[in-house]
Structures are given as C-alpha cells and as structure tokens.
Amino acid sequence: MLTDSEFKEIGIHQYGIVSPAEIVFDEEIRKICENNVCRLYGKTWACPPAVGTVSQCRERCLQYENAMVFNCVYPLEDSFDYESMREGHAQFKKLCDRLYEAVRPRYDSFILLSNEGCNRCETCTYPNVACRMPDKLFPSLEGFGIHVAKLAASAGIHYINGANTVTYFGMLLY
Ligand code: SF4
C-alpha cells in the first residue's frame, strides 16, 4: 500500500484498512438510489442498476483481500453552501484520479469506488453503448449498497468532521 506521505500528497485526509468481509451492505441504501435522491439512478455505468444487485456488488468486493477506506474534508460557508459542496465533490473526483494513478502500477487487479456517480463525460453512454473509459470507471460507494457511516466506523475514521464541512468517501479494494 502507499506510504503516509503518498496519501498526503494525493490529498487524502484520513484512511483505514478493513477486511471486505466487514463491509456492511444494506438493501435500504440501494432503495435511496432507487428513489433517485441524487438524480443519478440509471444515468451512468457507475450507479445502479448498471453496477448489478447489492449481492453481486458484495461478491465483487469479497474477491479482494483488503479494503482501504479514505476520505477528504472540504470547508463550507454554512450547511446550505451547495456551491462549495459541488466544488468539493469535483475536487474529490480529482483526488480519486490521483489515487488511481498511484495504485495502477502496483496492483494487477483492484476496484476503486468513489462518491456518487461518474461525471467524467459530458454525456454518459449508458445504457446503449459500453463505458468510454472502463479503466477509469469508479463505481459509486453508496450505489454498491454500502453503509458508509458504518464503513467509516470500521475503518476508524470520522464520518462527520465538524460544523461547516462536507466529507466525501471512497474505497480501494485490492
Ligand atoms: S466514463 Fe463516461 S461513459 Fe463511462 S460511466 Fe463515466 S460518464 Fe459514463
């Protein structure tokens, strides 16, 4: 795995390693996707239903020995500061790209899960044509049906990081 200084250089705020068997998958989380709260359900290859059932997602995760859970915290002016939330989210996607480039030479096989769906292309090819960049398709952590608050607790990192902040999470299975 990467060194502490590499994690810092990538911009990761906190991280912890868990066994994939410890990850809590919850059909209720998938129902939140199905209710289209984030308006990305059925919009990209990174979200349900394209990622498969919760049980298929769990099976994919269990193929790996380790899960590195990570986060980054972004400041907000107040809890209604949606512009900073969007900006933080865009920054987090770049962080995932940096992590991907750092781990790519080290592992033959891994999955990087990121926060929410994929916004890499202006218009996603879903559902008619295969993803344009399957290597850089980082499925949604929540879309896999993963209970992120419980995941953070298992990894020993904070789910909430103080007033006027937003925290985004990802996970590397390797
Ligand atoms: S990389 Fe492009 S085609 Fe693939 S899921 Fe993301 S937006 Fe869709």
Image: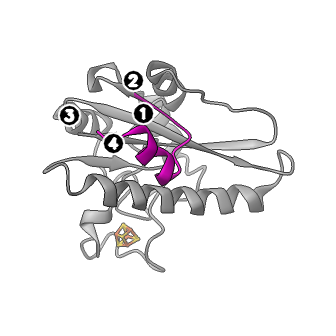
Q: Secondary structure at mark 4?
A: loop
Q: In the rendered view, does 112 fall on the left or right side of 84?
A: left
Task: Name the outermost residue toward the left.
Answer: 108
Q: In the rendered view, does 163 fall on the left or right side of 43?
A: right
Distance Cα–Cα, label 2 vs label 4:
25 Å
Q: Secondary structure at mark 3?
A: helix
Which three-letter amino acid code belongs to the residue tagged 4? Leu
Marks 1 & 2, CB-CB < 8 Å contact? yes
Can you identify the residue that label 2 sits on? 24
Label 4: few (<14), some (14–19) or many (≥20) C-alpha neighbours in 10 Å:
few
Residue 91 pos. (x, y %): 58, 61
Can you identify the residue that label 3 sits on? 59
Residue 68 makes an appearance in the image = yes
Which region shows up in magenta? 1-16
Q: Is mark 4 within 8 Å of ligand 1?
A: no
Query: Who is closer to the viewer here, 95 or 154?
Result: 95
Which three-letter amino acid code belongs to the residue tagged 2? Val
Name the mark on residue 146. Answer: 1
Query: Who is closer to the viewer here, 121 or 104?
Result: 104
Ligand 1 resides in the quarter of the picture at bottom left
Residue 85 pos. (x, y %): 70, 55
Label 1: few (<14), some (14–19) or many (≥20) C-alpha neighbours in 10 Å:
many
